[in-house]
Amino acid sequence: MVVRVQLRYNYRVYPEPGQRMALARAFGCARVVFNDGLRARREAHASGLPYIKDADLQKQVITSAKRTEERAWLGEVSSVVLVQSLRDLHTAYRNFFSCVTGQRKGAKVAPPRFKSKRDSRQSIRLTANGFCLRDNGKLYIAKVGDLAIRWSRPLPAVPTSVTVTKDATDRYWVSFVVDTEPAILPETTPETGIDLGLTHFAVLSDGRKVDSPKFLRRAEKKLKRMQKALSRKAEGSNNRAKARKKVARQHARVADRRRDWHHKLSTAIIRDTQAVYVEDLAVRGLARTRLAKSVHDAGWSAFVAMLEYKAIRHGRHFGRIGRFEPTSQVCSACGIKDGPKPLTVREWTCRDCGTVHDRDVNAARNILAAGRADRLNASRSAGKTGPVPAQRVEAGTHRDGQTTVVGIPAP
């Protein structure tokens, strides 16, 4: 069995005015099919009827609906777009059911919700029979035409599916799903534990500290001024629409800068270390406190996800330790538990061995020790070690005899 890596490569596209209208039509049809399927299943559940099978639902909301006068315009877009939209609904239901039955671990998954035409993000997905790459470098989308792409880097293999997205700033993007070989890096010796925080974004077990860039805080003054201007515009006016786009563009700049910084830092850590260990933080809980804005500004979850998929892609080990490990209470020198300490205490002295600890560096060293212990215990129980497959986030057309282990955007 050949193990391959599934990655997403994102590129900016520039559709012409006619193509923008065709894409808007495709976005709308995909949204209507998703909502019709969701409504049919909800009504069946409310009436006490059995769960509608996937094939029967497709016949009802796509095949039969096209023959009706109310939904005849569904035939104006590619059928691949409609089928993939319905597949997204099936996936959402399966994720919800697996969460309810306890088969899915981690954060709770809510049932699927209706999509709105006012959503800031609109998207369609196509498999290999709904698009193709032209020899002139353009992307052909069925019933849309040839889209001009800004090729920032070459694709490593033939894509198996593509997602076309329009964001809140009216930028258009395409995301290719590519099956490729893992890019294994040469083995190295260092291992590191990482303690994530707010004052210092990351503190490494070797004593290095990475300051938090605070992209949102730095843009707060400008955002406040722009949002005030937006609030003064009349509801439904063109000036309000223009002001809304200005605010959206500023938020997009903040998100783009944060993502770029996360990619650079995570890539540097993965290149220099053989194993990376982090603490499983309760981000949702922290986001409900007075630190919510700073927590969201840091983007810990996105950064940890990058570390995880890059470790799998490059042959490194990635591990998480439990969020209830007393990393700030245990002396990393002698192992004595010194008790809980308020956040105002940044340095403390071990009452047993007398070692003076920096709170964050000590926590990072304890994370490293706990991660090594968990890895050793796992290798003893399983008999071997290996990368844990990451969750896929996009569907694709897969080759037989190949296993996909990663489904995250490429750096």
Image: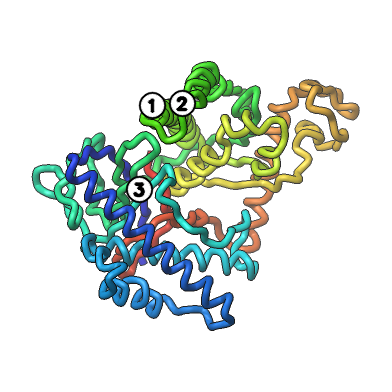
- Does residue 45 sit above or below 111 in this rendering? below
Circle 2: is it few (<14), some (14-19), or many (20+) Cα within 10 Å?
A: some
Residue topped by disc 3: 8
Residue visible at 38% across and 26% down in the picture:
239
Q: Which label sits on residue 233?
A: 2
For the C terminus, the quadrant is top left
Q: Residue 103 placed where, x, y %? A: 61, 68
Q: Does the residue at mark 1 contact the one at mark 2 (Cβ under 8 Å)?
A: yes
Q: Amino acid at mark 1?
A: Asn
- Mark-to-mark CA distance, 1 and 2: 6 Å
Q: Left or right: 46 with respect to 183?
A: right
Q: Quadrant of residue 75?
A: bottom left
SS of the residue at dot 3?
strand
**Mark 3: amino acid:** Arg
* Amino acid on which the number 2 mark rests in the picture: Lys
Lower sequence index among marks 2 and 3 = 3
**Residue at x-position 22% and y-position 36%:** 150
Judge whether 232 appears above or below 173 on screen.
Answer: above
Q: CA–CA distance between discs 2 and 3?
A: 39 Å
